[in-house]
Amino acid sequence: MLQTLITNWWLLGLRGLLALVFSIMTFMLRSSAETFTLREFAMKGMMIFLGMLALTAGACTVAAGIWRASTGKWWLLVADGVIVSAAGLALILATSFTLDTVTYILVVLAAAIGIVELLIARGLRRHLPDEWFLGLGGVASLGFAVAFLLIKPEEAGSMFLWLGSYSGFSALCMFAFAFRLRSLRASIHKIAQSVSS
């Protein structure tokens, strides 16, 4: 799986870029969500935008898992991408954008992503012991899911703040992971030999 990740590092970087764009847009829409007349519009617009970004980010992750896939647990990447894409599709097609609906979708999404990313990070540590960016992102996703479920923000502005912070942190972790993989491109053949041996 490590060879697949190194080869497709740019797709993971693209996923990080999409998460960063979403984080910035979330903070920009936060002020609109606190205005009563714009609250419903901001909520629907943000959820559809989130859905489109999640769908695209999931497609990038699936592509990273399938394209030039080597042996190993590349299917974990595909599972991660499918989860993200399914959540994005659910947000786009949802007819009701109540805070409760959005909260539960985000909690399930973050928890599933966190579990899969921790599984991937655990597999990578056998060949890349100093790699912890993906694991940190997985822990953050699980932590966000638990905190979001316990706190359950009752105002759209508060939810946007939580969501923007989580997306921004996830973007930084994914960027760091992608560029760490990029730095390993020159030694991919040595890594392939160590993995097979």
Image (cartoon, rainbow, N blue to C red):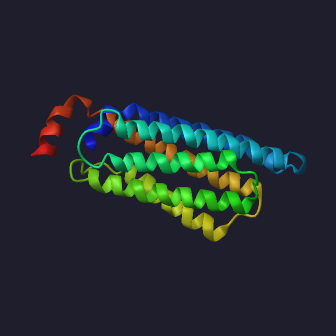
- In x, y percent, where is residue 102? 68, 57
Q: Residue at x 61, y 64 (%)?
A: 148
Q: Residue at x 36, y 50 (%)?
A: 76
Q: Residue at x 56, y 41 (%)?
A: 55
> Relative to residue 25, is residue 120 depicted above or below?
below
> Relative to residue 147, is residue 119 depicted above or below?
above
Query: Which residue is farthest top?
Result: 186
- In x, y percent, where is residue 147? 58, 66
> Relative to residue 161, is residue 153 depicted above or below?
below
Q: Residue at x 38, y 37 (%)?
A: 64
Where's the N terminus, which quadrant?
top left
Question: Is 89 on the left-hand or right-hand side of 82?
Answer: right
Query: Which residue is farthest left?
Result: 197
Q: Residue 63, located in which quarter of the rendered image?
A: top left
Question: Is 6 on the left-hand or right-hand side of 162?
Answer: left
Question: Is 57 on the left-hand or right-hand side of 104?
Answer: left
The one of 135 and 84 positioned closer to us in this rendering:
84
The one of 159 and 91 positioned closer to us in this rendering:
91
Q: Is residue 89 visible?
A: yes
Q: Is residue 140 visible?
A: no
Q: Residue 32, located in which quarter of the rendered image?
A: top right
